[in-house]
Structure formats: C-alpha cells, structure tokens
Amino acid sequence: KQEVTQIPAALSVPEGENLVLNCSFTDSAIYNLQWFRQDPGKGLTSLLLIQSSQREQTSGRLNASLDKSSGRSTLYIAASQPGDSATYLCAGGGGANSKLTFGKGITLSVRP
Amino acid sequence: DGGITQSPKYLFRKEGQNVTLSCEQNLNHDAMYWYRQDPGQGLRLIYYSQIVNDFQKGDIAEGYSVSREKKESFPLTVTSAQKNPTAFYLCASSSRQGDFLNTGELFFGEGSRLTVL
C-alpha cells in the first residue's frame, strides 16, 4: 500500500527565502507525482506534474524533482513571497497502480 | 474558460436527508473523481468513473452514491446512511491513457462544504 508523507506539517519563513518542501513515498512504482497548492476553503490547484520517466519539472519560481529510487520528491520555491502562503500537497501513484495517494500537506507561511 | 464547476459551495443538511453535490467539467476528460477532505487527514477517494455509465467505489464509498450519465457530469449524493457527512468535498477530473487511471494531470473544482445540522 502506497503511503505518502510530508514533513513538517507547517513551515514559516521570511520573505525572499529559497525553500524546499519534501514529499516521501513508500512504493517506487508510481506513474507520476503531482504537486498541488490549496488556499484556505478552496480547491486544489495543480502546480507541477512529473511523469515517472522524468526527473524534474519547472514552472516560474517552482521546480519539482522526482527520485523514484529514494522514494522522494521535492518542491523548490525560489525567492518566496507572502502570496506563496498556502498548503502544498503532493500525490503519487497512477498507472497500473491506478490509485493516487495524497500526503496531508505542508502549510507554508511566508512572513513579509 | 475550461474547468470544473462544483455547486453548491456551501450546503446544510438535516439528519436523515439525502443531498446531491453537482460537478460539471468542460475539459473533455474521461475520468472523474470525488474526494473527501477532513482536517488533519489526506484526501480520501469516494468514487471514480473512467467512462460514461461506469463508476467504481473508492476507499470510503459507504453512504454515498454517484451517476455518470454524461461525460461532463458526475454528481455525488450523500445519503442518510453516511454517519459523518460533515466535510469538504472535492471533485476532480483527468485525461486517461489506455485503461490506466491517474495518468494525466488532475484538475480540481473549488469544493463544496457540507455541514450536518
């Protein structure tokens, strides 16, 4: 059974800092790994999708990497801004395993 | 704009009542999903559908029912048999490669918050 872990549950950083959010998974046979952002009371917004054949994806100030052998994905946020404050969730699975398993998320607060 | 529309955004239910949450997508996606989100827990899959007129139970299907009569629509009914229905419900959709689920990017609606009075 796939388990996805995101530690720590909450993180507070000053504006301008570069930061890394971690996501660990137990079953390396994942089809893809997706990172989402969720604002309070809102749905999830897709940030980046990494297919199993890829090692990383980039969008603006965001970069996500995937290392299947170590069961780990990281989301790198460059030059953080107060507007980046939200909960960030990762989800892995899909393909032959079908089911997508979500982590519980990391709540990020960027202080002005 | 393409996307997923959920309604209503907020819903209140008395005990013993059935309620239906609407989910409509115009992304031309084959696969649609319903998730439940509770504080401190990850998203849990209720039901999913890969194609019209077909759907499968997820991890927590008891007390819920769905239909998939149109590609664009996947309504969720929360029945009186659901013992703890107060939660945030999220509908999602994705494209599909072959018979495999979750092979495409997953898109979510804005959610529906159900409260039992």
Image (tube, coloured by chain):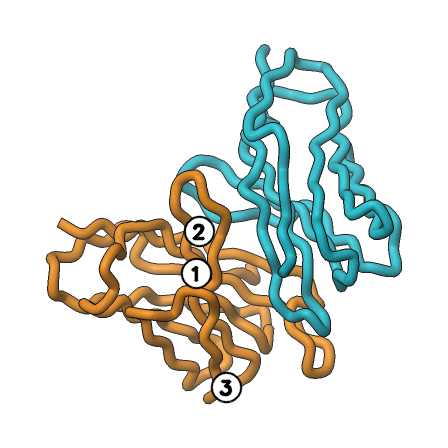
Chain colours: A cyan, B orange
Q: Tell me whether circle 1 and circle 2 mark residues in contact (CB < 8 Å).
A: yes
Which mark identifies residue B5? 1
Parent chain of label 3: B
Q: Along the horizontal axis of the image, is A6 left or right of B34? A: right
User: Front-most of B51 and A92?
Assistant: A92
- The residue singled out by tag 3 in the image is B52
The residue under label 1 is which amino acid type? Answer: Thr
Labels 3 and 1 positioned on one and the same chain: yes
- The residue singled out by tag 2 in the image is B110
User: Front-most of A44 and A5?
Assistant: A5
- The image shows residue B72, relative to residue B21, as above or below, that is below
Label 3 environment density (alpha carbons within 10 Å; few <14, some 14–19, many ≥20): some
User: Where's the C terminus of chain A, which quadrant?
Assistant: top right
The residue under label 2 is which amino acid type? Answer: Glu
The residue under label 3 is which amino acid type? Answer: Val
- The image shows residue A74, relative to residue B21, as above or below, that is above
At which x and y percent is residue A8?
Answer: 61, 28
At which x and y percent is residue A62?
Answer: 76, 36
Label 2 environment density (alpha carbons within 10 Å; few <14, some 14–19, many ≥20): many
Cα separation, mark 1 vs mark 2, equals 7 Å
Residue found 78% across the figure and 41% down from its top:
A64
Pointer 1 or 2: first along the chain: 1
Cα separation, mark 2 vs mark 3, equals 23 Å
Pointer 2 or 3: first along the chain: 3
